[in-house]
Amino acid sequence: MAPNLIPQMTNPITATTAEAITGASSAVKRRKNEHIHRDLIPGLPDHIAQTCLSSVHPSLLYSVCHSWRRLIYSPSFPPFLSIYAVFSSSDSVGFASFDPISSAWQFLPLPPPTAGLLLSHPSFISRRLPVQSVAVAGNLVLLAATADKFLPALSRPLIFNPLTRKWTCGPPLSTPRRWCAAGVSGGAVYVASGIGSHYNHKVARSVEKWDLKSNDHRYFRWEKMGCLRDGKFSRDAIDAVGWRGKLCMVNVTGDAAKEGIIYDVESDAWEEMPAGMLMGWRGPAAALDEETIYMVDESKGALKRYEPERDVWVEVTENQMLKGAQHITAGGGRVCVSCGGGEGIAVFDVVANPPSNMWVVDTPPGFQVLSVHILPRMSQNHFHPSD
């Protein structure tokens, strides 16, 4: 069963809309070639027809006719949510989006610098070198990776906008880095710690912020924020989880002894992580709407939810597929987890009752997940590949 990341529609299909759907479907079937059909709903101007159709679930529109199928991918139609993944294949990086309506992966155009990203090295036989990315303000942002000779691969972020289907460049970092902490809070991207061309204690304690919400070009830059107390968060790629105006992070994953810290974005201050949150943090974590943190206990194979009032992690569901999970994201009432080995993405409906409904999205053959995100579907100015 193909996953549908779209939350349940709040506007039900009215009788008038249902009649329009039936009438339009019959009219289209009577035509010898529906590709020449111009009216979305016969007898109605397109702007009124689109208002009617915008309250209908896109999966229904997709099944009726080609003109409606094209409509749901047009820039003017409210976009539904899709899974986006950064993949590795051999020693190359790829970017793709899984469309839950057509149940198909579509690869994104490659930004030029990705050809030089280093994903493996004889010194690290058992692991992939990280490629760090975040989802913010409806964009996929590539932040950090490793280049040849273990240098930082990116001097500035690379931004993919699903609605324009284009990559652009963000403002240059004051110090390009790799193996850093990266996260999003309130539409702003934060990069903390990490390693530049070589280890530097000042860089390992530094924090930079870039606010994507601002349209003022004067703020198209990274802003230096309050420093970390030490450089212990420069040892690996770290997800800084945006949660209730804060960024939560631990310096290692799994069951190993770890240190946790929380950054308050409003006060620009660092604080200790609550004991229960730190002790129970045993795998990748993500926050749904920056309100509820979900975490995968990768050794047990359990999806858990953090309850701050009691400072405990509560089990949501357990599944063998979650053992060894490395990446997680949340959005649209769903939590997506890349399964052990990176060859499949488990999708959980966490707003269902009980919240244990799960399905699996197979990854493209030969590709392994490096990171996973939830973003609006890509716009298309041509026929969808399934047309």
Image (cartoon, rainbow, N blue to C red):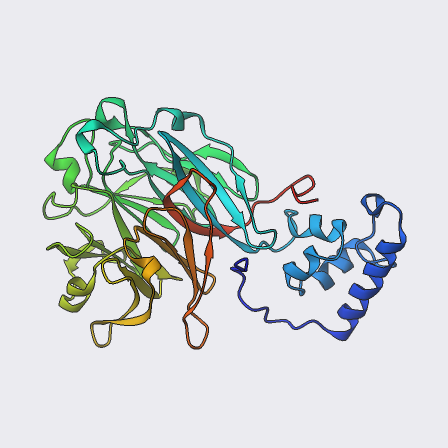
Asked if one can make out residue 354 in the rendered structure from this viewpoint, the answer is yes
The residue located at (70%, 51%) in the rendering is 69
Q: Position of residue 340 (x, y in %)?
A: 32, 51
- Quadrant holding the N terminus: bottom right
Looking at the picture, does residue 151 appear above or below residue 256? above
**Figure disc tally:** 0
The residue located at (16%, 68%) in the rendering is 276
Give 126 or 310, whichever is nearer the viewer.
126
Identify the image quadrant of residue 281: bottom left
Identify the image quadrant of residue 203: top left
Q: Position of residue 387 (x, y in %)?
A: 70, 44
Q: Position of residue 312 (x, y in %)?
A: 21, 72
Q: Is residue 213 left or right of residue 238?
A: right
Q: Position of residue 236 (x, y in %)?
A: 20, 42
Q: Is residue 270 left or right of residue 75?
A: left
Identify the image quadrant of residue 270: bottom left
The residue located at (65%, 41%) in the rendering is 385
Give 147 or 128, whichever is nearer the viewer.
128
The residue located at (35%, 53%) in the rendering is 339
Looking at the picture, does residue 353 appear above or below residue 166? below
Asked if one can make out residue 286 in the rendered structure from this viewpoint, the answer is no
Looking at the picture, does residue 4 appear above or below residue 252? below
Which residue is at the far top? 149
